[in-house]
Amino acid sequence: MITKTEFKEALQYWASSVSVITTNSNTHGLQGMTVTAFASLSADSAQILCNLNVNAETVAGIEESQSFAVNFLTTTQQTASNQFAGGASQEERFATNPWHTSVTGAPLLSESLVSLDCKLIEKIQAGSHYIVIGEIQASEVRTGQPLLYYHAGYHELAVAVDK
């Protein structure tokens, strides 16, 4: 088995979209965190998954509210990404980034490229993370370019390669 350092070195070369997972619960209030581990799961039942560290404070809010939103960030939202990655308090994150709610009550970031409003279906622990599965209750698609994370830095899409 490879070491944790080797694992992290190898996965720096996985380019991924930057998303912010948000939730709102009675006990914990508004919460959100930046993630790059997101995937579609099933088109038939409109399910997605994301991976959240077991120590992330946002997990408790998702468990209580039984809902969360996935917000794909645009290239203009690097500051938001840094804030939700821990560079600001939960209160400041939501005070400086416009948001609204839809079906579940989870905060949808109004300037994100896409917002998926999800009902929590299942949470499975795998090592240091939870695999969080959500069923999409509503979606909002806006215009812009996705913010990407690759080799420990932010990037934008290049010109499309001919097919």
Image (cartoon, rainbow, N blue to C red):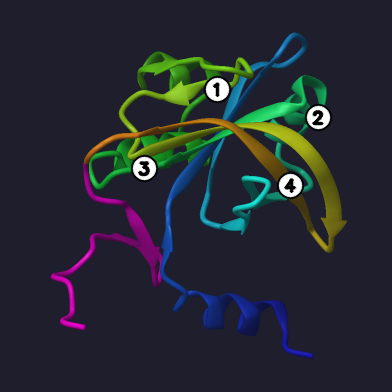
Q: Exactly how many numbered labels are in the figure?
A: 4
C-alpha span from label 2 to label 3:
24 Å
**Depth order, front residue of 148/6:** 148
Query: Sequence order check: which comes first, mark 1 or mark 2?
Result: 2
User: Magenta span covers which residues?
Assistant: 144-163
**Where residue 54 sits: x, y (%)?**
79, 47
Position of residue 150 in the picture relative to residue 2 (left or right): left
Q: x, y (%) of residue 47? A: 65, 47
The structure residue drawn at horizontal position 61% and vertical position 24%, both measured from the top left corner, is 31
Image mark for residue 90: 1
Earlier in the chain: of badge 3 and badge 4, it is 3
Q: Is residue 121 left or right of residue 96?
A: right
Cα separation, mark 2 vs mark 4, equals 10 Å
User: Which SS does the magenta portion mostly show?
Assistant: loop
Residue 93 is a magenta residue? no
Name the secondary structure under disc 2: helix
Q: Residue at x 79, y 59 (%)?
A: 128
Which residue is the site of mark 4? 132
Instruction: Calculate the distance from the C-alpha at mark 1 to the C-alpha at mark 4.
Output: 21 Å
The circle drawn on residue 58 is none
Q: Decide if residue 37 is on the left or right side of residue 53.
A: left
**Disc number lying in front (1 or 4):** 4
